[in-house]
Amino acid sequence: MKHLQSTRNRMLAILFLFTLILTPLHSTENPSTANASMEYGDLEDRIHNILADERLDGAIGSVSVRNAESGEIIIDRLGDIRLKTASNMKLLTAAAALHTLGPDYTFKTEILTDGKIVGNVLKGNLYLKGKGDPTLLKEDFDKMAAFIKSNHIETIQGNIIADDSWYNSVRLSEDMIWSDESYYYGAQISALTASPDTDYDAGTVIVETSPAQAGQPADIKLSPETDYPTIINKTKTIESGTRSISVTREHGSNNIVVEGSIPVDSSTARSWVTLWEPTGYALDLFKKSLVQAGVHVKQQQGDYGETPADAEVLFTRESMPLSELLIPFMKLSNNTIAETLVKEMGQVVHHDGSWEKGLEVLEDYVSIRGLNTDTMRIRDGSGISHVTNIPANELSMLLYSVQQEEWYPTYLNALPVAGASNRLEGGTLRNRMKGTLAEGNVKAKTGTITGATSLSGYVTTKDGKDLVFSIILNNFMASNLRDIEDKIAVALAEYDTGKEHD
């Protein structure tokens, strides 16, 4: 009998091991995950089939879906694998900034002096002190200059000094690729900078190339007008043909090279190009505004330095509040704003405007929101880094968790809306998922870098269930796989629990 009992126990043990092997693996974060997976089994099968696309052969497709009310994971496909998130990193940056700085936070730019106003003359230096504002336009420098003139200052005997000491002097995040440096998404970060447009692409200038007479170089203008960069015109106007204009900036300089051909009947070509050391760009615009306002500066060369502690504040310009800045930041996926927010958090919390201290603040925040920072590698605030790695389950956890924050409506409102044609509503999703149940329903952050794409956000199913989702695809060879993301998001929007289980 003992022998039979021992044999029976061994057989039960073997059967138990086979059961473990054959049981699908799901996240153990919530004990009811298995039940949820059964309820959404048809949806999981549909997503599995979407991810069977041959373009993902040899690549990784990760999907995490949660119940938005309970946080329970209902679909977990490789959700704990660390992957390149691209601009989905901005979901963390925006949440940390709203928590740390607050929705009403504004960036300030100050004009100060260490001199005295005697009659119509300022006897001393004028300081332009930046505190991170990425929204400064030429018209804002005009307003500053107009204020100086309104105080009856017609002559400045000293110098105009640019102060960018609010942040440290490191201009680019740790993993910025050198070949990206001249493009708008790779702009340098300075506490004193300027934008050419209301997308707030700070640290860039718009190069406008228009046709001249056939055989002549094209006409090139900068917007805003500035003497800070040097244009090297290698273009040619042609009688007919295809417009082919390239604009790049030489590394380590502000030499902007414009090359190619443009037909005589062509429209103007516009390119956004970053500037080396954007502090000097802001200084140049301010000096031009002073001249245009009729203020004479005796020392025209301009300079850089820190404002004396006892300098008198003459004027303070405040940006829009963070709640409004979040719209161009998230809807248009503005990298410069992302990195500026990181440095600002470091300055506000640790009095150190650096990536190191700013990312420390960010990680502290997402940790208290329940994310496992031990499984994440965060190197920047925008996600342009190919080293930043976050699992999809952590992104979906963040999206679930922030629903408890007072500022959550502001956060949700900043996300792109699928198929919404208005650029500042639909953002990077405005041309996606049109004519589906996801249109106007999916609110999510996009992300794209070479070999990686992501989409994470919120969706309501056909039968009214609110879900949180994160989709990350990595290491693929195709040019982009946004259509796969869209198919999964549409599948979530179309899902009807009751119908599927009739």
Image: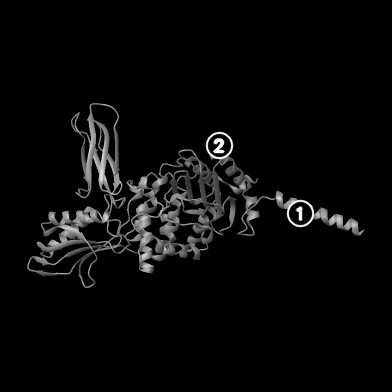
Q: Residue at x 23, y 32 (%)?
A: 236
Which residue is denoted by mark 1 in the rendering? 16
Q: Is 146 on the left or on the right of 323, as rendered?
A: left
Q: Is residue 178 visible?
A: yes
Q: Is residue 101 visible?
A: no
Q: Amino acid at mark 2?
A: Glu
Q: Residue furthest front?
A: 252
Q: Is 243 on the left or on the right of 57, as rendered?
A: left
Q: Which mark is residue 353?
A: none
- Quadrant for the C terminus, please: top right
- Quadrant for the N terminus, please: bottom right
Q: Whole-percent x and y of residue 215?
A: 20, 29
Which residue is denoted by mark 2 in the rendering? 54
Q: Is 39 on the left or on the right of 279, as rendered?
A: right
- Give the secondary structure at mark 2: helix
- Looking at the image, is mark 2 or mark 1 earlier in the sequence? 1
> Where 83 falls versus 191 (above or below)?
above
